[in-house]
Image (cartoon, rainbow, N blue to C red):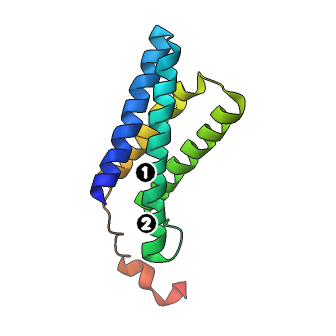
Amino acid sequence: MDSINAVTLFSYMLSTTGYILYLFLQKAYLQRIGYALLFVGFLFHTTIIGYGFVESGQIPVANLRETLCMAGWAVAGVFLFIQYRFNIKILGIYTAPFIAFIMVIVAQLPDEPTQAKTIFKSFWLI
C-alpha cells in the first residue's frame, strides 16, 4: 500500500512541475501533461480510498491522515470535473501544488490513530 501512496504523491508532484512549467513557458503540451499526471494521481488516489473503504467497511476518515487524504482526493476530483467541463487551464497551477502539499502532509502523518487520553474516558462524558 505504501508503494501506491508513493506513486500517487509522485504523480501529483510531477503534475505540479508540469503546471509550473506551463505557467512560465506557456506551452499547451505542458498543461496537458500536468492534467494527465494529475488524472493518473487521482486514479491511484481513488484506489487508496477504495482500499481503505474495503478494509474498514466505512469511508476512511477515522484520523487526520485519512481525512486529509479524502480532502485531497475531493479537491482533485472537483478540479478534474471543472477542467473537463470548463477547460480553465490556469486553475491547475493553483490546484496541483495544493494537492501535492496535502499529500506530502499525509505522507508525514502516522498511519495508526492515536489512543484517547484518560481524560476522555471520564464518567462525565457519558
Circle 1: residue type: Phe
**Position of the N terminus by quadrant:** bottom left
Pinpoint residue 58: horizontal percent, then vertical percent: 53, 74
Q: Which residue does the image show at 46% across and 73% down from the upper left? A: 54
Identify the image quadrant of residue 82. Answer: top right
Is residue 115 or residue 23 the one in the foreground? 23
Residue sitting farthest toward the right:
86
- The vertical placement of 101 against 19, above or below, is below
Is residue 104 visible in this depiction of the protein?
no
The disc label shown at residue 44, or none: 1
Q: Which residue does the image show at 38% across and 38% down from the upper left? A: 11
The disc label shown at residue 51, or none: 2
Q: Which residue does the image show at 39% across and 25% down from the upper left? A: 17
- The vertical placement of 35 against 22, above or below, is below
Q: Residues within 10 Å of mark 1 (few under 14, many from 20)?
A: many
Query: How many circles with numbers are drawn on the protein?
Result: 2
- The vertical placement of 47 against 98, above or below, is below
**Position of the C terminus by quadrant:** bottom right
Is residue 121 or residue 11 the one in the foreground? 11
Q: Tell whether label 1 touches label 2 (CB within 8 Å).
A: no
Is residue 123 visible in this depiction of the protein?
yes
Residue sitting farthest toward the left:
3
Circle 2: residue type: Tyr
Per the image, label 1 sits on a secondary structure element best described as: helix
Q: Earlier in the sequence, mark 2 or mark 1?
A: 1
Pinpoint residue 48: horizontal percent, then vertical percent: 42, 59
